[in-house]
Amino acid sequence: MRWALIKAAVAGTTMVALAFLIPLGLMVQQTARDRAFTAAERQAAALGPALAITTDQDAINRALASTDAGAQNRMAVHLPAPTAAASAPGAGGTGGPGGAGGSGGPGGPTIGEGRAAVADVSTAGGQGRSFTVEVPGGYALLQPVAVDTGRTAVVEVFVADGDLTRGVPTAWLVLSAVALALVAISVLVADRMGARIVASARRFASAARSLGAGNLAVRVPVDGRTASGSPEELREAAHAFNTMADRVVQLLAAERELAADLSHRLRTPLTVLRLNAASLGQGDAADATRHAVSQLECEVDQIIRSARRAPEDAPAVTVGCDAAEVIRERVGFWSALAEDEGRRWQLAGADRAAPVPVQRGDLAAAVDALLGNVFRHTAVGTAFSVDVLATDSSVIVLVGDAGPGFSDPAAALRRGEGHGGEGSTGLGLDIVRKLAEATGGDLALGRSAVLGGAELRLRLQTRFDGGAPRAGRRRNRGALFQR
């Protein structure tokens, strides 16, 4: 954003500077030209009184030398032709003392160094108006002056090319420096404004990232020194963000209360179930039932405690566990029920450590959901298998069975639809899918190539580069079925 503001400031200031400075520079150039010709007209007008008094060449020569242009040899006087009386012997001729040269004025001698053509001088004297003509090295101003009735002298003033541009380069340099200074100032102001806006936007983005990471206490300052200089729109967005964060905190608190209340309602049927289990007497089935009820009661208590606990009060946990160890434990738990129902089962690939970046409890819940689907949606006596496959970048858990499989795999993964069977909420596979996606992995449904029924493939990403399966990690799935 800062670069965008700087570019906009440079573009805008440059256009404004050019719009004003280019006409101003051209005006300075025209002013210098007009100044040079005005000075030449003053020099020519200075000889007017002398020519009105006398046309004596000596007197005109002295008047010519007294002017700046005459002293610099830039002025000439083209005298008119002498009258008959003046043409008598003894009258002054052409090229009197100090007169340089040449005839060819309006019929008379020329005093000084003339540069204009004879035709231009004759035109100026004949028409009685002044004008400029281009001569080598510059311009010549031809100014007619009436000396007496019917006779006109022409004063010629040379204006060099350098006089027309005197001071113009300096003026252009100053104007360019002013333009650059204006651009620099605009860039500085835009950079300071952009820095404030960017700082506010970065604070906003940092707060959003913190909120997304689970820090519900983060807020964006909307007043004070921290928010000074921020645009009104960003302050409004910060206020809306803070309102949203407060609302999220309220909703989460209400959701925790609701989860705790709903879980607490399970205590009554659990108490009845525990009393009934206690009356079963002795035996493996009775002991397994009591153990299962005890574990269920512990899980409900844990859910209530977790729901009542605020997120900031939650104990720190180490993210990560050994997937092989968790799977061995959960398969061992379900194996007792499998033996009671006459299900053959197999566990392969869980003999080596397979670390995954998920919490132990979350992975155990996911494995229970996968195995629970097998027991819930297949007939008693249906075999199942669990395979663990570790690669360089992921850990894959395959749960297959010999049941009928999925009639609609896509619908089974949609939250709330499930398999369509009685008692199915459709949330188990959705929980497993979210756990996989949290690591960058996925959950796929298909058909088991060995058992012929459904197969669920849970892939937990351990790092984000590809990797080939490690040799010897997967075993033959068709052998060593146990009872």
Image (spheres, rainbow, N blue to C red):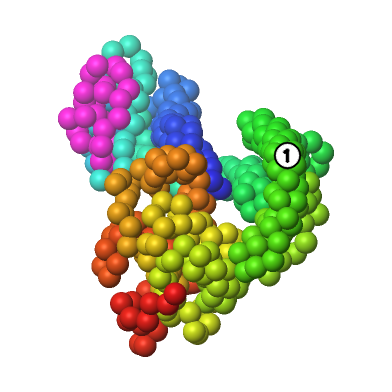
Screen quadrant of the C terminus: bottom left
Residue 305, above or below 26: below
- Looking at the image, the residue that sits furthest to the top is 149
Q: Is residue 416 left or right of residue 206?
A: left
x then y, percent, for residue 41: 43, 28
Residue 111 falls within the magenta-colored stretch: yes
**Residue 255 percent location from the top left of the image:** 69, 38
The question of residue 42 being in magenta is answered with no
The one nearer the camera, 378 or 69, is: 378
Callout 1 amino acid: Arg
Q: Which residues are magenta?
A: 106-135
The residue depicted at 31 percent of the width and 77 percent of the height is 478
* Nearer the observer, 33 or 399: 399
Q: In which quadrant of the rendered view does residue 252 lie?
A: top right
Disc 1 target residue: 265
Check the image and report above or below for 296 versus 157: below
